[in-house]
Image (cartoon, helix red, strand yellow):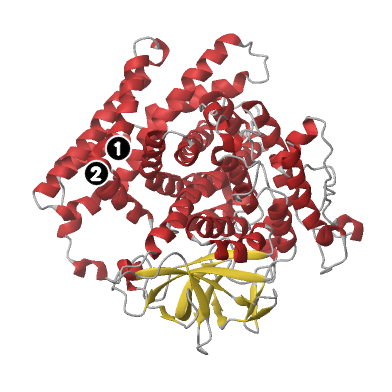
Amino acid sequence: MLNQLWRYSRLSSAAAPFFMGEARERTVLLSHSFSSLPVSPLAVILRIRNISVKILPMKNAEDKGEKWMTAKYAYNPRDAKFILTEWLPVEEIFSYERFQAYSKEDIDLILEQAHRMVRDIVAPTNDIGEEHVPRLENGRIIGPPTWGEVFRYYQQNGWGTSNFDEDNEAPLPEVLYSVVAEMTCAASPAWVYYPALTTGAAKVIQTFGDEDLKKRFLPKMMDGSWQGCMCITEPAAGTDVGDTLTRAYPTEEEGIYKIKGSKIFISAGDGDHVDNFIYLTLARVEGAQPGTRGLSLFVVPRFWINEDGSYTDNDVVTTGKEDKLGIRGCPAVSLAYGDNDNCRGYIVGNPPDETGVGEGMKQMFQMMNGKRIESGLTSTGITSNEYHNVAEYARERIQGRPLTDPTGERVPIIEHEDIKRALLLNKATTEACRAMVTTAYFYMDISEHDPDPQRRKWAADRVACLTPVCKAYPSDEAWTLLCETIQTYGGYGFTEAYPAARAARDCKINSIYEGTNYIQSMDLIGRKWIMQNGQAFADLLQEIETFIRNNKAKMLDFSQEFTFLERALQAYRFMQSTTAKWAREGKFNLVPCYSRRILTATGQLLGAYFLLDQALISWQRLQELEESHFDYYFYLGKVISARFYVRQILPHVWYLADLLAEEDSTIIDAPLAIFAF
């Protein structure tokens, strides 16, 4: 513990010169004083255990009399606490040596303090980024004010990339950190890309880089001095990454290559919030194979770091900035590498082998798969936040009279059946998505830290099976849920005065990012269903079957729910056998006609299983509580969420199975000429 305290103090003291001194004086628009906030997960536990911890304050805008609009952060962590303390067996995770600084009993306290930190420090960046959209001036991006300060605060105090530092002696496990990340996404969907992308890039360097790369880049990525970025997309190579044109040429210095090419849609790819940008860039070494097999990954700093720590230009130029639908505060830029033949980068891992095969896609897929689950996490955070916002509005908005009492008093709109339907759809679906995503992170912890290699492999297979579903299902459903939220506000929902419009704009990118949701659906069917000769996914379905068999007969209060879940499981297996038959018969093009809907059905099947499992726990809690207990309606809400989801959403699974049985080929048969009219 003393070593952990020393590490925390060392991290905090690194932040002090900026936050407590006068260096880089800049207007800060934050509206609260945060000197009472524990700024690190470990600090929370140390404080409760009566160990003295120094807390670093943020500068306060109120001291200068500044006024600004408050971000509408309404996230409620109660369901996440239920998942971590009552549903998932997180004791297993805390038993691993890596996470023994914490215990299950610490979860509530950590989440409460994270919730407070996110509300008071991160959430204000939401409005600031919307009011001060980044602009391109003289070849550089000028970003929203305060975003850099908040980024460094988050990074330097243990909530961001440094949580995953190999030398961190008290990191949060992924399953717990994911809830902190969901809160952050809920608070500021655009700002969150700063730490999230830096973390993804740092993890790749930590996993695949040599010691020189780690020492050269990781410390300043951990402390918020440098921004990490993922650079894949090109004007002629979007989803089809194999068409990448960016080239890498060996130099006389081992491991250093000249880079020449261009990238587009680079999120957080430029700004004034950090001193340097670290671009993880896919490029093809001269002479390597065509397609994805020939790609290598390079660490390309925007400014070259000399041996004495000084910077020189590295011939990377920002050539444009997208005018985006949403997440406007986070710039998406175009980059040109090596126009003056002086851009250099470090290769990650080994150069292409004698057959011209590079290691880049394998390395980049670590970051991409992480970002895919994060896309689902972000979507869940956004929809959850707006559910709580609109539920509060519905409780306060007086409009109309009940159908059963048309001459009675006007009532809050939450009493109208269609509003309750919209809220329940939001609540149940968001809880299903959260259960799915958090479960994936639970398996991730096991896959990385369990001492048993076989259990690590089993958990890694689970993560792989869940990844396309966690990415696509929440990000697809978010758009529908936010449309329901806008509708609930009525005319106000169609204005920017209420938060739903912005949330809808912010969420849409997640169904496009990191491989569109169509790509995820084909990955599910073409790879994940057949992984390990089909055994990995079959084991997941078998878990659902075992759950039904163990509980259906004894949980009579949920007999209809178990009957529906059983029917959906049978329908899902029919869909698997049907698509396999199409493959045997050469009807391959039928699969993409239905693949996205099959992925949605996968999310609905898993969501129903998870919610029903949670409902059984909640039902038992209800038997122990009086209605006056403060948690009574939380548990009742969990039961009702499961009933609604299983009875009104899950039936889509067997409806889709009936469609597949018809083998309708209307989509295939439609001539292209009809789309001119």
Determine which residue is flagged by label 1.
537
Residue at screen point 37% across, 36% down: 458
Quadrant in which the N terminus is drawn: top right
Residue reaching furthest left? Answer: 585
Position of residue 621 relative to residue 44, above or below, is above
Label 2 close to label 1 by CB (< 8 Å): yes
Q: Is residue 656 above or below residue 468?
A: above
Q: Residue, x 16% and y 43% (percent of image)?
A: 580
Q: Residue at x 64, y 33 (%)?
A: 412
* Label 1 neighbour load within 10 Å: few <14, some 14-19, many 20+: many
The type of residue carrying mark 2 is Ile
* Label 2 sits on residue: 530
What's under tag 1, amino acid-wise? Answer: Phe
The span from disc 2 to disc 1 (Cα, nearest Å) is 7 Å
The percent coordinates of residue 172 (x first, y second) are 62, 40
Q: Nearer the viewer, residue 417 or 404?
A: 417
- Mark 1 lies on a secondary structure that is helix
